[in-house]
Image (cartoon, rainbow, N blue to C red):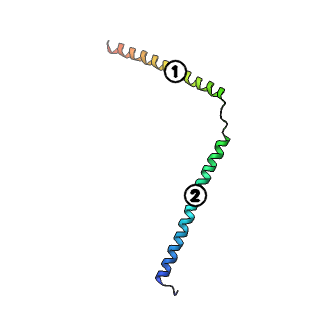
């Protein structure tokens, strides 16, 4: 009870500094653990071999091309139909 106002203020300020330090160290630990977790997850990934990668890439490119041609044909037919109806 015999403490002065300055002593109370210094105790409060020193306590808040300790809290800030512990918060920043927690953030550093969290950042490190996030990167460590990310590294561990990347080690779990089973990457495809070159042969599988080539086959899947070829399939995606071919299917994309075929769908593009189908959409272009459908667009041409619809455009022709609309032009025919407009000119009636």
13 lies above or below 2 = above
**Neighbours of disc 1 within 10 Å: few (<14), some (14-19), many (20+):** few
Task: Please report contact status of discs 1 and 2: CB closer than 8 Å, yes or no.
Answer: no
Query: Which comes sooner in the sequence, label 1 or label 2?
Result: 2
The single residue placed furthest to the left in the displayed view is 87
Q: Residue sitting at 55 percent across and 63 percent down? A: 23
Q: Relative to 44, does residue 9 appear above or below in the rendering?
A: below
Picture coordinates of residue 17, whole percent (x, y): 52, 69
- In the image, what residue occupies the spot 66% across and 39% down? 45
- Whether 22 is drawn above or below 2: the answer is above
Q: Secondary structure at mark 1?
A: helix
Near-viewer residue (86 or 34): 34
Residue 52 falls left or right of residue 80: right
Location of the C terminus by quadrant is top left
For image coordinates 60% across by 49% down, the residue present is: 35
Where does the image place residue 2, in percent across and percent down from the top left? 52, 87
Q: How many marks?
A: 2
Residue on which the image places disc 2:
28
Residue 20, numbered label: none
Q: Position of residue 49 (x, y in %)?
A: 67, 30
Q: Residues within 10 Å of mark 2 (few under 14, many from 20)?
A: few
Name the residue nearer the viewer: 32 or 69.
Answer: 32
Q: Residue furthest bottom?
A: 2
Direction from residue 45 to residue 74 in the image, left or right: left
Q: Secondary structure at mark 2?
A: helix
Residue named by callout 1: 65
Camera-near label (1 vs 2) is: 2
**Residue at 52% across, 21% down:** 65
**x and y, in percent, of residue 28 in the image:** 57, 57
Gap in Å between the C-alphas at discs 1 and 2?
49 Å
Between residue 51 and residue 23, name the one nearer to us. Answer: 51
């Amino acid at each position: 009870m015999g403490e002065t106002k300055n002593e109370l203020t210094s105790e409060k300020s020193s306590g808040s500094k300790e809290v800030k330090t512990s918060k920043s160290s927690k953030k550093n630990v969290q950042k490190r653990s996030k990167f460590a977790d990310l590294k561990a997850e990347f080690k779990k990934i089973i990457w495809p071999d070159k042969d599988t990668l080539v086959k899947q890439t070829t399939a995606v490119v071919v299917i994309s091309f075929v769908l593009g041609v189908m959409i272009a044909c459908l667009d041409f037919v619809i455009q022709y139909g609309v032009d025919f109806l407009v000119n009636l």
